[in-house]
Image (cartoon, rainbow, N blue to C red):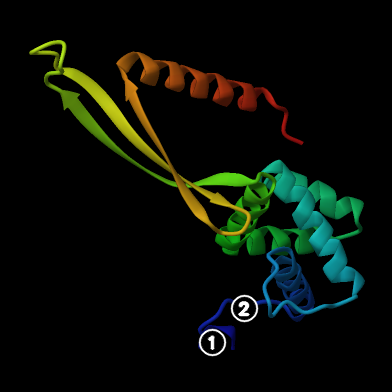
Amino acid sequence: PPEAFDTKWVPIQAIGMEVAVHAAIDRICNFPHAQETDDSLTRRCEEVLKRNLACGFNEKETASYSAELGISDQDSKVITRAMQERHSDLRSRMIDVAAAMSEEHLADFDWKLKVVMASSTASSIQKPLLHLVLFLKNVNGETREVLLELDREELETVLNSLSKIREAMQKIPQR
């Protein structure tokens, strides 16, 4: 009986879809063990997955794309479940693809808050400074550091610019 096994009970018809969708995810993620299959089910799963990744993991869109490609509602649910199970793999791949679009990308950062107490021109200043180190990684995997020292006004300018970028990106329609 199904209860005797440690895994979920899956109808025998769904096993083919499970194999196909996980093979498609492996291919999308460029895993070395990904099977080079030429079966149409795996190709259709891969197409649904790619279109869904472009729209941000939308369950309704998955059902719609699946129907367009002749995939049943039940099999569409298998695809959705696999996407949820393998979300971290798919997300990592999306990050890698996005990072590859630029010569360099932000790999990490570090910051410190300093307070300047005095200078050669003034005996008492007490001016806060943000010391920001950006670690940029290029396409060859080499990392370089960019050092920034920002006073309060410069930091406000940077934060306002980043806020405008975020607002502009939120206005971009998602498919």
Q: Which residue is mark 2?
A: 9
Percent position (x, y) of residue 36? Answer: 82, 78
Q: Residue at x 73, y 63 (%)?
A: 28
Residue that label 1 marks: 5
Residue 59, placed above or below residue 82: above
Q: Is residue 51 above or below residue 14?
A: above
How far is the residue under mark 1 from the one under mark 2? 8 Å
> Any mark on residue 73, and which?
none
Which residue of the protein is positioned furthest toward the left in this rendering?
123
Query: Relative to residue 42, is residue 138 drawn left or right?
Result: left
User: In the picture, residue 17 is in which quadrant?
Assistant: bottom right
Q: Are marks 1 and 2 in contact (CB under 8 Å)?
A: yes
Q: Quadrant of residue 146?
A: top left
Specify the amino acid type for callout 2.
Trp
Mark 1 nearby-residue class (10 Å; few <14, some 14–19, many ≥20): few
| Residue type at tag 1 | Phe
Report the side of 173 relative to 127 (left or right). right
Residue displayed at 62% across by 26% down: 170
Depth check, front residue: 123 or 28 = 123
Q: How many marks?
A: 2
SS at circle 2: loop
